[in-house]
Amino acid sequence: MATLHTRFTAMLGVRHPVMQEGLGPYKTVHLAAAVSNAGGLGTVSIPGISEDPIAGAAKLRTYIEEACALTDFPFAVNVPVGADKHGHVLPFSAAYVSAVVDAVKDREIAKRLRAITTSAGPPSAARRLIENSGLIHIHKVGSTRQAIRAAQEGVDMIIASGYEAGGHTHARPVHTFVLGPSVTEAVACPVILAGGVRDGRGLAAALAFGAEAVALGTRFVASHDNPDWHPAYAARVVAAKEGEDIVFQALYGPSRALPSAGIDELALLEARAGVTEDELTQFKDLRLIAAQRDGDIEGGILPCGQIAGAINDLIHVAEFVPGIVREALAVLEQLRRLHAD
């Protein structure tokens, strides 16, 4: 089977330099297992941030065990990390990170759960919980400055996520074609490129930028292998038109999604006098879950990357992951021949 060998594949023990992004807050157990079984790195998402920390951590442990029952190959868990003004990890983040660290104390789980990805805040607070756990720590950034800081704080890999990406994005937009080469030039650790990738051409471009893998979110949402989510969500992604996505204020700042009545309602709630941060957080979390779990594409909130406008079908993950690598190799060979000619 044709493949590409990079530091990403070597360090994680996977066949292909393809990663599924964290896509919560609702569970992604079956999708993560499908991606890992196909030779990529699947990612299990947390149950949500409005969960009671103890109950949420227990539920996440169940997700991890379910994923272990579905795949014998490496996978990751994604935890958005919030911190207070003193740099202390917020209770829900600490509970979820600790649940992942505790899980790999089980040798059977540790054979499969190889990495933790963190995002939203700086990695330093979570780093103290993760180091010495044996987990590969992957941190997502939206700027070169953040990448340099993450590398200095000891993370093992970096996801450079361009402004095109779905979900949480950046107050100061830096697009993938600008961010990718800048980050790979600035840090020595392996870089994974995310934002606007949907096929082997994107993987070939990422390799040209110096990255060692790609991370895809929206493309994997629109698949036949995500049964934990309602099919109406995938259908809405396929129906999305180019330029239809919007950016709104989410849990950790700006976020990209498809327009919905739920986002309109959120704007009204935010403008209401006396509304608390906890009320906003719970509203956002529950509306995200309503879209993902229940298929409420009108009243829910639907994170989605700009690439949705270029997606016209549902994929089978087992075919797609090796296929994206074959296509990238073909593109690279075509370019080599062009140079030779």
Image (tube, helix red, strand yellow):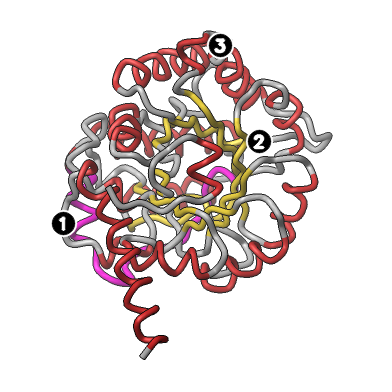
166 relative to 299, above or below: below
> Which residue is denoted by mark 3 in the rendering?
54
> Residue 231's x, y, as percent?
17, 40
Mark 1 and 2 residues: CB-CB less than 8 Å, in contact?
A: no
Residue 261's label in the rendered image is: none
Within 10 Å of the Cα at label 1, are there few (<14), some (14-19), or many (20+) other Cα atoms?
A: some
Dividing the picture into quadrants, the one containing residue 224 is top left
Residue 4 shown left or right of residue 80 in the figure: left
> Residue 269's x, y, as percent?
48, 45
Determine the residue positioned at 56% across, 32% down.
Answer: 116
Q: CA distance from mark 1 to mark 2?
A: 35 Å
> Of the residues shown, which amino acid type is indicated by label 3?
Ile
Q: Secondary structure at mark 2?
A: loop
The numbered mark, 1 or 2, whose residue comes first in the sequence reads: 2
> Residue 246's x, y, as percent?
41, 63
340 relative to 41, above or below: below
Residue 183 shown left or right of residue 53 in the figure: right
Q: Secondary structure at mark 1?
A: loop
Determine the residue positioned at 37% across, 38% down.
Answer: 287
Determine the residue positioned at 52% across, 48% down.
Answer: 250
Give the residues drawn in magenta, as a range: 232-252
Determine the residue positioned at 31% across, 51% down.
Answer: 261
Q: Is residue 276 visible to us here?
A: no
> Of the residues shown, which amino acid type is indicated by label 2?
Gly
> Which residue is denoted by mark 2 in the rendering?
82
Instruction: Compare residues 317 and 258 and report the one nearer the observer.
Output: 317
> Which residue is denoted by mark 1 in the rendering?
313
Q: Is residue 91 magenta?
A: no
Mark 1 and 3 residues: CB-CB less than 8 Å, in contact?
A: no
The numbered mark, 2 or 3, whose residue comes first in the sequence reads: 3
> Of the residues shown, which amino acid type is indicated by label 1?
Asp
Q: Secondary structure at mark 3?
A: helix
